[in-house]
Image (tube, coloured by chain):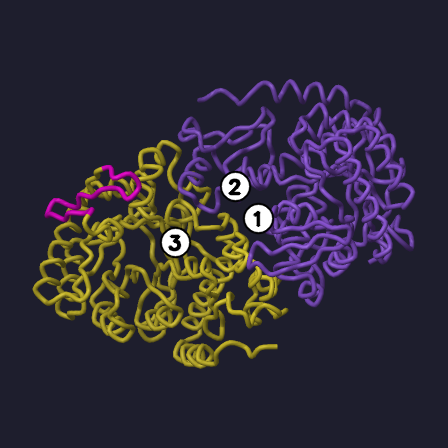
Chain colours: A yellow, B purple
């Protein structure tokens, strides 16, 4: 379990190169290293939907996100611990980050009550009552054996007026301190705080200062990509990133579209997670070097060409648009499988391109070319 | 496209060893060889549900069955031909057998009308009207580029009285002759006739004689496993197999459970197809060396052991019963994927064992041990 770069406690993080505000780094955990900027594939309930672990790995994915809410309900955190932890349970020997469960619990609406103590909610599966406190969230993530534990925070609704945003953020900071208390440090494992504050720069700065005061292995930026639009999200990153410690990784939660990733990396973000490549794959949407397309569209039904002629993934190597169109129309499982694999591969290849561009000091050129390519649109019909 | 053992026309078939009535052989097609006795995985609509072609191949599967009915409706035989044939369309470069479409069309009930000319039916997808004649069925299978084309036959309902069975069988024989007329011979491609006659030995013998008179590359036995029970099915094989040419492969259609395969091989059958391993995999049923089990059962939820401790498949190597139980309960796609992969692997490993047993002249011993193992039942709970 010992990795080069690991100290006796926490996660290793080394910034290898900089280009403007962008950073190229390496995150070291008890389950191996992650090259940053990194995109984490979402494996909600102990599986990246439709893919075997080795297929996830083949896309270039080095770290998965697991969802505490889903896993605590089924199969249950204690059961996963008894079975050797989430890595062994799902046969993913590489790093895992888990969320706190808060986001999904607070999306339950009437089934959920938030107090200073934490969140009480009823399971969407069977109505059973649960308590999710900062302490229990951390305990669950320990039981799952997450390499990166996220603090429980209150997901400030958007839009929120300033007093609401401040009250909510301040509660999240108190919860963050309780999570830090509850967290048991180990080598190769770490705890991330989460900056809140809605779209108010001074609240974001106050939140970042509170978290630095508590001290975390990494710093996430939460409460964005909730409807505020890309420009406002980028504005918040420009405020927040410089207020976070240089030596620690920064994680923009739940983001995003390919262009969001490019812009956020340029503003100093090191880690991302998003359901977009996997969920879109299940509805027929594919991300390509020329923007996105939906394979359900009838114009693909006779097209012998790959989804993305510039992509090197096994889906693009082995299968035509016509075949993928057929699979999706026929509701065959292989359609979502092949599209998910392609989309994850596309996302990871974009992250690889971004890492290379930072190393070469040409991120600005890369971002400009990326925007041109995406605007070009899909290849013309045969 | 040239394979050793291929003559200028038809399929190569060599019987390498015999043990009682059982045969160990090699079938040679334009897309490679198949070791017999062989189990064909069912790839209804141009995909073995949930598996990539290389995963199918890794189970030991050497030949797939495609369904003419499904493929003619969607994506359409002409479209598949335009895209280079079914092998290229689905990226399966190995042998393919297609059924005639008759079985599924005649299962449509009121949507289907049978006349001497053929079958008129309405698509279950959009109600569009189609004609399926013996000539069109063969044409479709040519367009799909099937290595083995099946004659269109009338699927005699079960039970059927003797006059009904005879009338139906005789029409099937006239259709078989029309299929032979319509079939365009090529090296590495062949046409199989289908013996009908319900459970009447003299009708089975008359059907076999008619087919031999016409002359086919292989001989299928149809209209069994339709509710008559295993013993009556075995009785019909004992009547029919000796009436078929020694030098040509014999294919028992739509069969079956593991014990059916063992008994049919012992009676001289060379080829099988069945949806059981794939369809059961999607409902949580697993076939093992100790009989079958359903992974949905709550007794598996904490079990760290593999599905089948005697199985060498990747599912049994990498995942616990507890994990598979979780996936199936959570309705995750990976559950059906992993179970289908295991079940196909189990079936193919059984076929491999049968081939070895025939070569070693110990099929009877193997069958006796197999029956004992299956009767043992699942391993006791932890």
The reply to whether callout 1 and callout 2 are in contact (CB within 8 Å) is yes
Residue closest to the eye, A132 or A266? A132
| In this picture, residue A159 sits left or right of residue A4 | left
Q: Which residue is mark 2?
A: B282
- Residue in view at x 78 percent, y 48 percent: B151
- Residue in view at x 13 percent, y 69 percent: A202
Asked whether residue A115 is drawn in magenta, I would say: yes
- Residue in view at x 69 percent, y 47 percent: B65
Disc 1: host chain:
B
- The percent coordinates of residue B37 (x first, y second) are 77, 36
Residue most extreme to the left:
A163
Q: How many marks?
A: 3
Q: Which residue is mark 1?
A: B49
Disc 3: host chain:
A
Q: Secondary structure at mark 1?
A: loop
| In this picture, residue A381 sits left or right of residue B117 | left
Asked whether residue A260 is drawn in magenta, I would say: no
- Residue in view at x 84 percent, y 29 percent: B202
The reply to whether callout 2 and callout 3 are in contact (CB within 8 Å) is no
Q: Quadrant of the C terminus of chain A?
A: bottom right
Vertically, is A42 above or below A142?
A: below
- The percent coordinates of residue B49 (x first, y second) are 57, 48
Q: Secondary structure at mark 3?
A: strand
Residue closest to the eye, A139 or B69? B69
Q: Residues in magenta?
A: A111-128
Measured in 3D between alpha carbons, the distance from the residue under mark 2 to the one under mark 3, in whole angstroms, is 23 Å
Measured in 3D between alpha carbons, the distance from the residue under mark 1 to the one under mark 2, in whole angstroms, is 9 Å
Q: Which residue is mark 3?
A: A42
**Foreground disc of the pair 2, 3:** 2
Q: Quadrant of residue B62?
A: top right
Q: Secondary structure at mark 2?
A: helix
């Amino acid at each position: 379990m010992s990795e080069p770069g690991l100290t006796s406690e926490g996660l290793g993080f080394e910034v290898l190169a900089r280009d403007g505000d962008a950073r190229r780094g390496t995150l070291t955990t008890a389950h191996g290293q992650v090259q940053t900027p990194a995109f984490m594939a979402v494996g909600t309930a102990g599986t990246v939907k439709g893919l075997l672990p080795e297929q996830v790995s083949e896309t270039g994915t080095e770290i998965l996100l697991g969802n505490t809410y889903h896993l605590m309900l089924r199969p249950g955190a204690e059961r996963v611990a008894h079975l050797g932890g989430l890595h062994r349970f799902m046969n993913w020997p590489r790093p895992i980050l888990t969320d706190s469960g808060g986001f999904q619990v607070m999306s339950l609406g009437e089934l959920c009550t938030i107090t200073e103590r934490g969140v009480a909610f009823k399971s969407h599966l069977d109505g059973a009552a649960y308590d999710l406190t900062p302490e229990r969230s951390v305990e669950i993530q320990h039981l799952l054996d997450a390499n990166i534990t996220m603090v429980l925070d209150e997901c400030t609704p958007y839009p929120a007026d300033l007093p609401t945003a401040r009250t909510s953020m301040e509660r999240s900071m108190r919860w963050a301190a309780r999570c830090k208390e509850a967290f048991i440090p180990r080598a190769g494992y770490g705890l991330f705080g989460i900056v809140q504050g809605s779209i108010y720069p001074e609240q974001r700065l106050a939140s970042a200062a509170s978290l630095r005061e508590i001290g975390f292995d990494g710093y996430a930026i939460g409460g964005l990509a909730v409807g505020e639009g890309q420009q406002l999200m980028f504005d918040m990153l420009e405020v927040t990133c410089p207020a976070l410690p240089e030596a620690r990784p920064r994680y923009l939660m739940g983001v995003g579209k390919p262009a969001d990733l490019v812009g956020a990396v340029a503003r100093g973000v090191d880690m991302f997670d998003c359901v977009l490549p996997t969920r879109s794959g299940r509805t027929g949407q594919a991300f390509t070097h020329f923007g996105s397309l939906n394979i359900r569209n009838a114009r693909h039904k006779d097209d012998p060409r790959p989804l993305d002629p510039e992509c090197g993934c096994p889906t693009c190597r082995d299968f035509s648009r016509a075949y993928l169109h057929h699979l999706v129309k026929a509701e065959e499982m292989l359609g979502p499988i092949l599209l998910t694999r392609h989309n994850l591969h596309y996302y990871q290849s974009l992250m690889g391109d971004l890492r290379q561009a930072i190393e070469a000091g040409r991120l600005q050129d890369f971002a400009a070319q990326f925007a041109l390519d995406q605007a070009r649109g899909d290849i013309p019909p045969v």
